[in-house]
Image (cartoon, grey):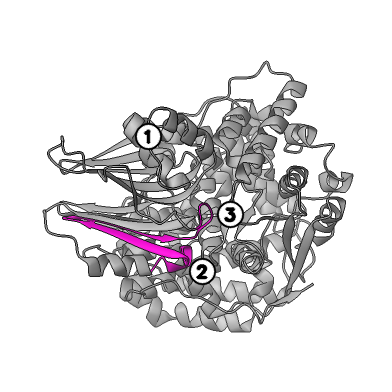
Amino acid sequence: MCGICGFVNLNGKSASKTILEKMNHALIHRGPDDSGNLLDGNVAMAIRRLSIQDLHHGHQPISNEDQTVWIVFNGEIYNSPELRDQLQSKGHTFSTRSDTEVIVHQYEDATDDCVDYLRGMFAFALLDKNPKSKAARMLIARDRLGIKPLYYYHDDDLLVFSSELTSLVQHPAVIRDIEPQALYQYLATGIVAAPLTMFKDIRQLLPGQLMSLENGVLSFKIYWSIPEAENSDLSEEAAARGIRQMLEQSIQEHLLSDVPVGAFLSGGIDSSAIVALMAQASEKPVSTFSIRFEEDGYDESYFARLVAEQYNTDHHEFAVHNHGFNESFLRSMITHHGQPTADSSAIPTFIVSSLARDYVKVVLSGDGGDECFAGYSHYGWLQQIGRLYVIPKLLRKVVRRLCYLSTRLPLLSQSYRLRQLINALEVSMSPKSRMPFEVLRLNCDADIDQLLASNWKSRVFERSELADFLDNQSGEEVGKGQRFSFRYFLPDAYLPKVDRMSMATSLEVRVPFLDHRLVEFALKLPGEKHWKDGRGKHLLRKAVADLLPEDIFTHKKQGFSIPLHRWATGKYFDLAEELLSEHAVKKRGLFNYKVVRQLLDDCRETGRHKQSLASEHRLSHRLFMLVLLEMWCRMYIDKLIEQPIHTDLSEIISHA
């Protein structure tokens, strides 16, 4: 696991070592063990290395035998031993045992198709100096599921790339303006989807995408796509056996390491299954790590201990105390992401990564299980809302209006089911193909339009990439929801959170559920096989039923998040008031201050009077979103921070 960066001067000017070193320095947390660089005329590449395989000889950049092909690489290739044997049998000579060198020789053998042979998580930049070509060629790639990040900036004179945005923007030629379409996506859902970033001229590679630079021309190719459902005739028993077999194989491969490997253990089905299969495959006790919050409804530590005891793991549990939000903590989270992201679960991910790093260098995580096997409640929600479309739209509008008026009655004002029905009817007003997006959004178009300042309302907020993807989906609603998760929320929210927050602590996190063969197998099954009898993961439950205590399957799913509305203390509101003051909002020019002021007042009022939990969550997330955006603007638009901020966790954590 590493961080990579570099640039190519398309105008032919020699690459600056000073600029390259500044970019690479901003990645030091991703690779504190080693660093390296290559400057070759107008081309510059650099690496910060976290040594996991071939600890003493895996220094990068790495080249082929005659030094005509060079690479910087971030990630892990789990089938590298198998590929090495095949390549050696064809006459390739290796100078290291690292998986990085395997990619170089695989490229020599298969050129751009080298990515088809790789199983793992990766982002790499490869320089081909073939003397038969008129000019050097650059190939940049991202893994199929988008586990590892790759950002880039391109204009007539320059191509810049990096694993993280904070590193990329250190290049002085990179323009730092806000991207209007990204702002819309962020206000709608709290995240920004690839290929966009919050920076107007910076993009990110899509999962499963190649980018090549040849003779000054930049071109792109999708080499892997999210599969459609097709195996509808496969029996449940056969599907469960297939899932179990592939998961066992994936975990065995993910244990490839020259350093100890541990696991995050939350007490849910996904992480518990990972730990159970790790324990079966390991000779020594597995090190497991859990955190718990003081607030009710956010503690799954009991279930984590059940699994830890059953498999005799070396279990470490930590308690997180509510001291409210710390400004330096939020600044640290933003600077590691490089752009605002309103997923508050980044905070516990950062905490558990920091704690685990004191014991191990690599952990396995259950991320991806909910997407593969329809574990989120909104998959069932999509199924139910889909049935509303048989009712004429005019009638749906009338019913929605009547329900809304009913909330003004004292007996119904706090009715959760009535609010659910109103929300479902609201979603059903949009085209059916857009349901997955509408169900997950935090702010509707009307709210966004009301919030934005007049000079931003005139800008067209297009959703062409996402809209086209959704409009081209077919089949039943659960399956469409799963594929949307793999296109949007998984690669643009959940995986960046895990990557940035773990690498902030120099910890490598591996995700066995996202072996692309397992993903393909799961998504080729109809979503209705995964979501059955009102709950998700039907097939996964069958596949691992013999591994886990019954309580793991029956307790309510809580998710890995923080009690955001409870952490909003007076200190946090003081920070919000300063960041979103009338002067600050008007100077920024993005938002209507009256609407922002009302949101601040509503959040304070909701906290005082303990209104419905749903209201607290909704308002808290809307305010959190604006707080993070303004903090980001001050650090990246107004001036530029040089590297991510580190923060002290000692105040809020204790060993349980």
| Residue 34, percent from left and from top | 43, 64
- Separation of disc 3 and disc 1 at Cα? 31 Å
> As drawn, is 215 to the left or to the right of 97?
left
| Direction top: furthest residue | 233
Residue 116 visible from this viewpoint: no
Residue contact between numbered discs 3 and 1, judged by CB atoms under 8 Å:
no
Look at the picture and state if 356 lies above or below 227. Answer: below
Amino acid tagged 2: Met
Amino acid tagged 3: Val
Q: Residues within 10 Å of mark 2 (few under 14, many from 20)?
A: many
> As drawn, is 189 to the left or to the right of 522?
left
Q: Residue at x 44, y 48 (%)?
A: 96
Q: Residue at x 44, y 49 (%)?
A: 193
Q: Residues within 10 Å of mark 1 (few under 14, many from 20)?
A: some
Which quarter of the picture shows residue 135? top left
Give the labeled residue for mark 2. 333
Which residues are drawn in magenta?
26-55
| Residue 567, percent from left and from top | 66, 74
Which quarter of the picture shows residue 281? top right
> In the structure shown, which secondary structural element does the residue marked by tag 2 occupy?
helix
* Residue nearest the viewer, comparing 236 with 505: 505
Q: In front: mark 3 or mark 2?
A: 3
Give the labeled residue for mark 3. 509
> In the structure shown, which secondary structural element does the residue marked by tag 3 occupy?
strand
- Separation of disc 1 and disc 2 at Cα? 43 Å
Q: Residue at x 76, y 66 (%)?
A: 317
Q: Is residue 48 magenta?
A: yes
Earlier sequence position, callout 3 versus callout 1: 1
